Amino acid sequence: MPVGLSADQLPRLDDMVTNRKSVKRGEALFHAGDAFQSLFAVRTGFFKTRVSSEDGRDQVTGFQMAGELLGLDGISSDRHSCDAVALEDSQVCVIPFSQLEELSREFSDLQHQFHKIMSREIVRDHGVMLLLGSMRAEERLAAFLLNLTQRLHARGFSGSSLILRMTREEIGSYLGLKLETVSRSFSKFQEEGYLEVKQRDIRITNEEGLRALVNAARC
């Protein structure tokens, strides 16, 4: 969000983001129906967002890591439309939305950057729709892992090794797959030399092979 701001503008943004909140693993940062007042920048940790259907089932709608924003769902209706739950002990920076709007009107660069962040979320949602609409199970999992490592690499982490903070069941919920299908796909990827899997520790050993799977699905 600070991209493009001048040295004399940055303190104004820093003054706005002074409150930090810790969220224990399994606890919710906010629930669907809560009044929307702030956005939350993930400082450390990992979150999932989920919605609940009328029959009580939970559907995972996304995973958010350090450097990403939570709470954008509440802007349109002034109420959150999903739950945000910590997958590990986490900390967020609280960004009061009314102050962000006021500052954005004053600093056009900040407004432009915020619009880019919102656009990126829309593009990501479109990507999920493509996953669910046209890809087979293995292709969905390959695209998910590539996206996850790409996002981690952009934040200074390894581009090939990661620790899954979410369960296979949560991955299945997000990708529209059964738990058995996710587990079977992981095993197949390991047998074919795409991955090394040790419980939640994943190392991508054939990135081009995974990309070929995803690209074939888009052709």
Image (cartoon, rainbow, N blue to C red):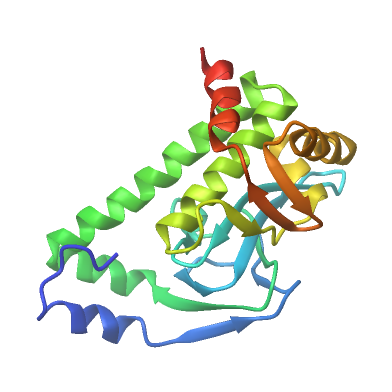
For the N terminus, the image quarter is bottom left
For this view, does 11 lie left or right of residue 36? left
- Tell me residue 128's x, y (percent): 57, 35
Does residue 151 appear anywhere in the picture? yes
Q: Residue at x 74, y 35 (%)?
A: 189
For this view, does 150 lie left or right of residue 182? left
Q: Nearer the viewer, residue 75 or 154?
A: 154
Q: Residue at x 13, y 59 (%)?
A: 108
Q: Residue at x 76, y 43 (%)?
A: 173
Asked if residue 4 is positioned above or below residue 56 in the image, the reply reads below
Residue lying at the far top of the rendered structure: 219
- Tell me residue 166's x, y (percent): 72, 57
Does residue 80 appear anywhere in the picture? no
- Tell me residue 48's x, y (percent): 65, 58
Q: Nearer the viewer, residue 47 or 158?
A: 158
For this view, does 65 lie left or right of residue 165? left
- Tell me residue 94's x, y (percent): 45, 77
Asked if residue 55 is positioned above or below residue 134 in the image, the reply reads below
Q: How many marks?
A: 0
Give residue 91's quadrant in the image. bottom right
Give residue 86's quadrant in the image. bottom right
Asked if residue 54 is positioned above or below residue 213 in the image, the reply reads below
Q: Nearer the viewer, residue 44 or 59?
A: 44
Q: Residue at x 59, y 29 (%)?
A: 209
